[in-house]
């Protein structure tokens, strides 16, 4: 393995460790994201759910459709999903509207 490959592998390990420790001690803000498989990639055998499970620190909230799931993740974990699977998956923050009519 060349030194750049080794450096990248070590950096990825450090990022994962920092994230896991932060999540363990509750110091990482978790945001809801919608992750969906791009239309052109839906012919592949793997789904968004299968790919997202490979990223540490991501919690799946809803997966009734394996190609469109809702996850809770830190900003770092969402960026990691985008980095690993950006050509196959779309990652967007979930936007929810309050329908509270009391205001």
Image (spheres, grey):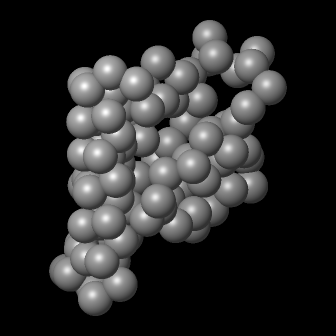
The answer to which image quadrant residue 24 occupies is: bottom left
Q: Residue furthest right?
A: 45
87 vs 35: above or below? above
Q: Is residue 7 left or right of residue 94?
A: left
**Residue found 42% across the figure and 41% down from its top:** 81
Q: Residue furthest bottom?
A: 25
The answer to whether any part of residue 64 appears in the image is: yes
**Residue found 53% across the figure and 55% down from its top:** 70
5 vs 101: above or below? above
Q: Is residue 32 left or right of residue 67?
A: left
Quadrant of image for the N terminus: top left
Q: Nearer the viewer, residue 36 or 74?
A: 74
**Residue found 68% across the figure and 56% down from its top:** 63
At which x and y percent is residue 25? 28, 88
The answer to which image quadrant residue 101 occupies is: bottom left
How many numbered marks, from 0 up?
Answer: 0
Q: Is residue 52 left or right of residue 67?
A: left
At which x and y percent is residue 47? 70, 36
Q: Nearer the viewer, residue 6 or 97?
A: 6
The answer to whether any part of residue 97 appears in the image is: no
The answer to which image quadrant residue 92 occupies is: top left
At which x and y percent is residue 7? 24, 36
Q: Nearer the viewer, residue 92 or 51?
A: 51
């Amino acid at each position: 393995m060349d030194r750049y490959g080794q450096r990248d592998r070590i950096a990825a390990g450090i990022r994962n460790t920092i994230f896991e420790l932060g999540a363990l001690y509750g110091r990482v803000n978790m945001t809801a994201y919608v992750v969906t498989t791009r239309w052109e990639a839906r012919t592949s055998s793997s789904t968004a759910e299968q790919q997202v499970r490979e990223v540490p620190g991501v919690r799946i909230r809803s997966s009734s459709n394996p190609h469109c799931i809702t996850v809770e993740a830190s900003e770092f974990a969402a960026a990691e999903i985008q980095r690993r699977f950006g050509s196959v998956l779309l990652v967007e923050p979930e936007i929810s509207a309050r329908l509270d009519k009391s205001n």
